[in-house]
C-alpha cells in the first residue's frame, strides 16, 4: 500500500504475487514500492536458488540448455522489475533505496552463476559472458554510487540488511580486481562503508570480517598479510541488536549459510 494511502486510511487493492510477477509497463510501475520490493526480493531469492540448483546440475551432468533457459527467464524477470521501479532522485525511504541496491546485487549474482557454469568457454559463451560482465560492472558501479549516499541517512534508518549488498559488491571487485585498477579503489570504498556501518550494525561487522578473510586468502589487497582483530561476536553475544531489529545467534548462522550460497 502506498504511504499516502496508508496515512489517509484509504483502501488500496493490490494484485496477487503471481500476477505481479507477470506485470509489465505502466501496470507494473503503478504498484506500490512495497509491492515492487517484494517482487524484487522474489527475483533475488530465485536467483540464489538458481545458483544452488545449477551446482547440483553440474554434479550430475545435466544439460546446459536447461540452465540457460532458467537463467534467461530470471534475467527477463529482473529486467521487468528494474524497468518498473522508479529511479532514485534522493534517498527518501530506506526500503525503497535498499530495493535498488538489492536489484543491482541480483545482477552480480546472475553473472557469478553464469561464470561458474561456463568452465569450457567457446566463442558464443565468451560473448555471453562478456555481455554479462559489462552489466555486472555497471551494476557494481551503481552500488558504489548508492553506498556513497548512505551518509544522508541516520544510521538507525539504514536498512539492516544493507551490509549484505555492500559485501556482495565488494566481493565482486575483489574477485575481479585484476580487470581494472579502479576496482581496488572501489573495494576499499566498500569496506570503508561497512566499517562505518559496523558501529551500529553487527551484520556489517560480520561482512567486514568475511572480506578481510577472503582478501587474505586471495593474497591481494591491503590486508593480505594482516589478521583480523575483530572479536567473533557469534561466540560471545547471545542476542544482537541492529537498530530496532534483533538477531539471535541462529539468525547469524542463517546469514552465514546465505553468504556461503553466494560463493
Image (spheres, rainbow, N blue to C red):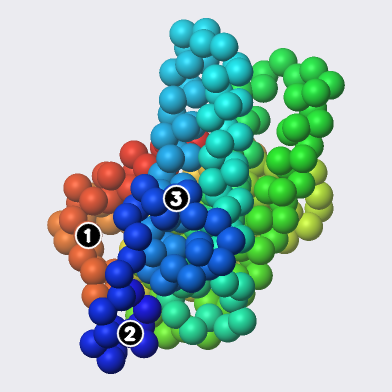
- At which x and y percent is residue 51? 49, 31
Residue nearest the observer in this picture, 17 or 239: 17
Per the image, label 1 sits on a secondary structure element best described as strand
Residue nearest the observer in this picture, 240 or 160: 160
Most extreme residue toward the top is 61
* Real-space CA distance between mark 3 and mark 2, rounded to the nearest whole angstrom: 23 Å
Q: CB atoms at circles 3 and 2 under 8 Å apart?
A: no
Residue sitting at x 42%, y 62%: 37
Say which residue label 2 marks.
5
Say which residue label 3 marks.
21
* Real-space CA distance between mark 3 and mark 1, rounded to the nearest whole angstrom: 30 Å
Query: Toward which corner of the image does residue 198 lie, by quadrant?
Result: bottom left
Residue nearest the observer in this picture, 177 or 135: 135
Q: Residues within 10 Å of mark 1 (few under 14, many from 20)?
A: some
69, above or below 261, in the image: above
- At which x and y percent is residue 127? 81, 31
Question: Horizontally, is 185 left or right of 210 in the view?
Answer: right
- Ranked by sequence position, the earlier of labels 2 and 1 is 2
Most extreme residue toward the right is 123
- Ranked by sequence position, the earlier of labels 3 and 1 is 3
Label disc, if present, on residue 206 of the rendered structure: none
Amino acid at each position: 500500500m502506498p504511504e499516502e494511502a496508508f496515512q489517509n486510511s484509504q483502501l488500496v487493492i493490490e494484485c496477487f504475487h503471481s500476477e505481479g510477477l507477470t506485470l509489465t509497463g505502466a501496470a507494473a510501475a503503478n504498484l506500490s514500492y512495497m509491492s515492487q520490493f517484494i517482487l524484487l526480493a522474489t527475483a533475488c531469492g530465485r536467483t540464489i536458488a538458481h545458483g544452488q540448483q545449477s551446482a547440483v546440475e553440474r554434479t550430475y551432468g545435466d544439460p546446459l540448455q536447461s540452465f540457460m533457459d532458467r537463467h534467461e527467464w530470471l534475467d527477463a524477470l529482473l529486467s521487468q522489475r528494474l524497468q518498473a521501479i522508479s529511479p532514485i532522485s534522493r534517498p527518501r525511504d530506506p526500503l525503497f533505496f535498499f530495493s535498488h541496491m538489492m536489484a543491482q546485487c541480483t545482477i552480480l549474482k546472475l553473472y557469478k552463476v553464469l561464470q561458474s557454469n561456463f568452465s569450457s568457454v567457446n566463442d558464443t559463451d565468451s560473448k555471453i559472458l562478456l555481455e554479462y560482465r559489462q552489466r555486472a560492472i555497471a551494476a557494481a558501479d551503481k552500488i558504489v554510487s548508492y553506498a556513497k549516499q548512505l551518509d544522508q541517512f541516520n544510521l538507525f534508518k539504514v536498512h539492516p540488511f544493507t551490509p549484505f549488498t555492500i559485501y556482495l559488491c565488494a566481493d565482486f571487485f575483489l574477485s575481479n580486481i585484476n580487470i581494472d585498477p579502479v576496482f581496488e579503489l572501489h573495494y576499499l570504498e566498500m569496506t570503508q562503508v561497512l566499517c562505518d556501518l559496523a558501529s551500529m550494525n553487527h551484520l556489517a561487522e560480520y561482512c567486514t570480517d568475511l572480506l578481510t578473510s577472503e582478501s587474505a586468502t586471495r593474497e591481494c589487497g591491503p590486508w593480505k598479510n594482516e589478521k583480523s582483530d575483530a572479536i567473533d561476536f557469534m561466540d560471545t553475544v547471545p542476542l544482537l541488536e541492529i537498530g530496532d531489529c534483533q538477531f539471535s545467534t541462529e539468525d547469524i548462522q542463517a546469514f552465514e549459510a546465505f553468504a556461503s550460497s553466494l560463493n
